Image (cartoon, rainbow, N blue to C red):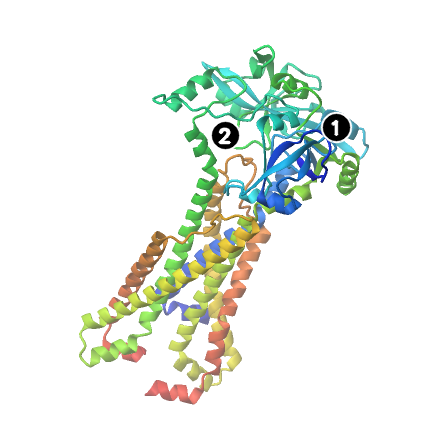
Amino acid sequence: MISLLVLLSLQGPAPREVAIEQRLARELGLGVGDTVRVHREPGAVGTLMVVSAIYQARSDPATVLRNEFEARFHLADLARLLGAPDRIDRAGIRLQPGIAPDTAAHRLDRVAVGFRVRPSAEIASESSRTFLVVSRFHRAIGVISIVASAIFLLCIMLLKVEERRLDAAVMRMIGVRRRTVFVALLLEACLVALVGAAIGIGLAWASAEIINAYYGARFETDLRFAFLTPEIMLFGTLLSVVLGVLAGGTAAARLIRTSPLVLWRRG
Amino acid sequence: MILLAAKNLARHRVRNTLAGLGIAVAAALLLDMVMLAGGMERSFERMLLSRGFQIRLAPKGTLPFDTEATFPGGAALSGTLRADPRISAAGAVLGGALFTRVGDSLLPLAGLGVEPEGQGLYELERGADLVPGDTTGIVIGASVAARTGWKIGDTVRLSGGTDPQVARVRERRVMVRGVVHWLYESRGERTVGVTLPLIRALTGRSGDRVAMIMVKVARDADVEPVAADIRRLEPGVEVNSVATLIARFRTRLTYFRQLSLILGTISLFVGVLLVSTLLTITVNERLGEIATLRAIGVSRAGIVRRVLAEGALLSLAGNGLGLVLGLITARYLDGILTTFPGLPAAISFFVPERGAVLRAALALLAAGTLAGAWPAWRAARAPIAATLREEAT
């Protein structure tokens, strides 16, 4: 493992260049122009290098949880440092226009020994597999949460409407039509569902802000960990209203079918 | 008391069934999160200790096979370690990309060079194992056997790249000695094992560099002293005991632990809220009945006990269903998470353990029972005369 040791030395042969990311510069208290000794491994002979640039590392969700530092070298310098001249991890090829990447990659891969040739799209797809898994997991957890909240909502709506049986009985006794009572109860359920959805959206927004602030600070990144999109808000509101109307409607229908006297007595 | 509570609950079948279902889903989620919180670590620990190797040496600053880095003097160091009487086995490992030809295509294989006298990466299933100094043998996993059709005793060609000096492919003919079970192989990976000298020859690596050394200490009590001695002996090498590896693993999976904590708390809260709401409304509906009971001499404590029993019964019914639901959903969720690329097939995220299941069930039962405390208190404190008068008018 390459370790960076700071040596404020200005002696020796002309140092090579290294660019380091901002977090590492902050951690080691380095600035542009400082000289560092870079080792392949502890105890090995190091190479003097000058910090030629400090950059903001690109936020990469694939590596953010590893919380590792990054430094960039000229290819030849790094190969020499690692004791593996003319060895590389990967190389990119830009094809002439009109040549299909899949065909070219397949043909090269059949004859290549010691390396694999793959189209960029395939690599991108494989790199995003981790996120696809996490996304599938989140969706599954989301479905369970939706089922739990749906049952909760149904139960509450049922209780809420049943709580209004005395009012319903009075309304029916003074001559209010069944249909009007039903619509009134349904509207009330709808309103409760809408208010609940609004509060839920507020809570979700606050949680997303807290999550982003916490993980952003923890991993020193500007990545967003939680998003509250208009689609999610719309879905939440619709689900809440549909369930509210369904539960409220069912309970209200049961209520208006019951005789007002029975409702009054039960009240 | 329980019978009375059950009868009271049966008076409102629809709402109580819904509440029971709600509690069941909350219990299932809670159980899943409890399993997720501890399951990964236990599963990881079991995998690490599956062959009894308690210490892993890796290049400084890395975890074993987390990067392609190697460290020098590996085979020499493993030899030194094997001479230590406290150590029962030690073996160096070096990885590299290998290839073989299947039809007209090259099939990439994950090659592992091992020291057969101290390897902890596989268990032999059929055939013979590699022996020290064997430079013509190979062991393969079931996935390789299935993909290539290789059988024990077959002679096959393995290559490891091109030699840039002579522009020739480094290729060897090797014999399949045995079929093994790779302990750390990920799904879809095709791993083959050869000896350390052979992988070096195939991948064109010179010197005594290795990616990892696995160490098995004879007595568990000696693990930390041995690890400390190796750290002193080789300061340039990262010495990872199982505890260290689990701690590093835990850091990487912070997200899942925090998620399980948050979702577990929410599900517990939902369960409590459901029981509490339901009992509050039920008590409000039955205030007259409760006042009558109080008027004929039932004590306040008796009323409290009855309401609490209803909460406990509701939670208990939800818990029972929740347990079954939780185990089913855990299996489904585990099926999703274990498809993480590069994750060893032996790792599970949701490990059902009796202790965890019991803790989750007890937590929900206690919470459900306590959720009835506020409505129970209200029921017991209701003024008898005023309530009865109100009921009569």
Is B102 on the left-hand or right-hand side of A41? Answer: left
The residue at which mark 1 appears reads as B78
Q: Mark 2 falls on what kind of element?
A: loop
Is A28 on the left-hand or right-hand side of B161? Answer: right
Q: Mark 1 falls on what kind of element?
A: helix
User: Circle 2 marks a residue in which chain?
Assistant: B
Of B348 and A123, which appears nearest the observer? A123
Of A167 and A68, which appears nearest the observer? A68
The residue at which mark 2 appears reads as B188
Q: Residue at x 36, y 62 (%)?
A: A197
> Quick one: label 1 or label 2, which is nearer the N terminus?
1
Q: Residue at x 77, y 43 (%)?
A: B221
Q: Position of residue A95 (x, y in %)?
A: 40, 22
Mark 1 Cα-neighbour bin, 10 Å: few <14, some 14–19, many ≥20: many
User: Could you tell me which quadrant the C terminus of chain A lies in?
Assistant: bottom left
Choose top left, top right, bottom left or bottom right for residue B318: bottom left
